[in-house]
Image (cartoon, rainbow, N blue to C red):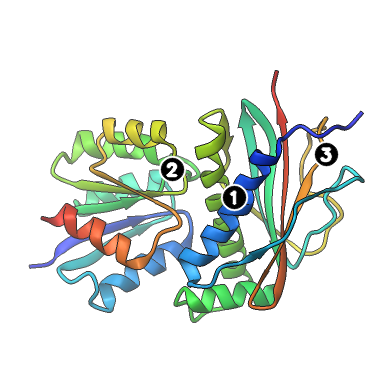
């Protein structure tokens, strides 16, 4: 049976990381909405570009930032980029996922071991993972300059 | 003569961003000598180019930043290394410093924070 494994303060860490990322790197804070559990058990929010970090160690699961092309183009523009290829969009969506995961590690500790980013495009049904999980994933929706994006986190604590 | 900087990060966006700080004059006195996307490539380039300063990511494919710091510190003890990483917990920072890094800047960072950190390392 799937269950909720993380506490409210654990989830808040990811919300704060989102606010901090956009404020620091673009000068415009993201408006982060309330997190909610994905009852289906499978993240189904994937957007044009998705940056996935696999988590191992004391936890297992993933952190995935999913955003539309136009939003990432805007982030790239503010970062000083003048090239807007799929490669650059995949790079920035992976870098955002990596930064958010790294920030979360300050809260969860070294037990949260994070992988290099894996970028996958498109609106696929599920994240690329061979693992089965016992906890439900949760989604944190955010708005930034009118664009909508989601952070989807799934973490099982290892006993 | 400008000091020579090598930028190591698996994100091209981050490499470009740091490089622009040199090209637009905000990091005066630094010239880019190499760009690397992973630790193994960085070590090879460090041996060839012998940079004065390195910005080093930690989570990278092939060889991670900690292993690369250790190798560069052993082979090029005069090279100063600034870790620029999303892994910002104290234990990770301490381990990187013990392996030979000289400073630590966590992501996300503002341009001025990086300029300040690199300027301190140059002094």
Mark 1 on the same chain as mark 2: no
Indicate the secondary structure of the residue bearing disc 1.
loop
Indicate the secondary structure of the residue bearing disc 3.
loop
Residue B88's disc is 2
Residue bearing the label numbered 1: A117
In primary-sequence order, the first of circles 3 and 1 is: 1
Left or right: A75 with respect to B57? right
Q: Residue A7: x percent and y percent?
A: 71, 35
| Pair 3/1: label in front | 3
Mark 3 on the same chain as mark 1: yes
Residue A42's disc is none
Residue B31 visible (yes or no): yes
Left or right: B79 with respect to A52? left
In the rendered view, would you say A150 is above or below A155? Answer: below
| Pair 1/2: label in front | 2
Chain that bears disc 2:
B
Using the numbered discs, state the Cα–Cα distance from disc 2 to disc 3 in whole angstroms. 27 Å
For mark 1, does the 10 Å Cα neighbourhood hold few (<14), some (14 to 19), or many (20 or more) residues? many
Residue at 72%, 60% (x, y): give it: A33
Using the numbered discs, state the Cα–Cα distance from disc 1 to disc 2 in whole angstroms. 17 Å
Left or right: A36 with respect to B112? right
């Amino acid at each position: 049976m799937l269950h909720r494994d993380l506490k409210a303060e654990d989830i808040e860490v990811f919300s704060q990381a989102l606010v901090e990322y956009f404020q620091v790197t673009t000068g415009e804070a993201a408006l982060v909405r309330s997190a909610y559990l994905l009852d289906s058990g499978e993240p189904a929010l994937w957007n044009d570009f998705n940056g996935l970090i696999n988590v191992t160690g004391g936890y297992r699961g993933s952190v995935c930032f999913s955003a539309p092309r136009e939003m990432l183009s805007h982030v790239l523009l503010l970062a000083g980029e003048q090239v807007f290829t799929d490669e650059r969009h995949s790079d920035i969506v992976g870098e955002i996922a990596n930064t958010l995961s790294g920030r979360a590690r300050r809260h969860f500790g070294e037990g949260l071991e994070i992988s290099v980013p894996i970028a996958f495009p498109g609106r696929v049904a599920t994240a690329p993972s061979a693992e089965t999980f016992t906890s439900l994933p949760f989604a944190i929706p955010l708005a930034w300059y009118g664009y909508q994006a989601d952070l989807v986190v799934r973490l099982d604590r290892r006993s | 003569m400008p000091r020579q900087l090598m930028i190591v990060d698996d994100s091209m966006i981050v490499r470009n961003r740091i490089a622009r700080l040199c090209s637009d004059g905000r990091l005066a006195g630094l010239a880019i000598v190499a760009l690397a996307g992973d630790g193994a490539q960085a070590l090879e380039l460090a041996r060839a180019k012998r940079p004065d300063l390195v910005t080093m990511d930690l989570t990278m494919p092939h060889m991670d930043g900690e292993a690369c710091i250790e190798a560069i510190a052993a082979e090029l003890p005069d090279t100063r290394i600034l870790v620029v990483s999303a892994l910002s917990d104290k234990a990770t920072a301490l381990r990187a410093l013990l392996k030979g890094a000289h400073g630590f800047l966590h992501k996300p960072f503002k341009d001025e924070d990086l300029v300040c950190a690199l300027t301190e390392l140059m002094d």
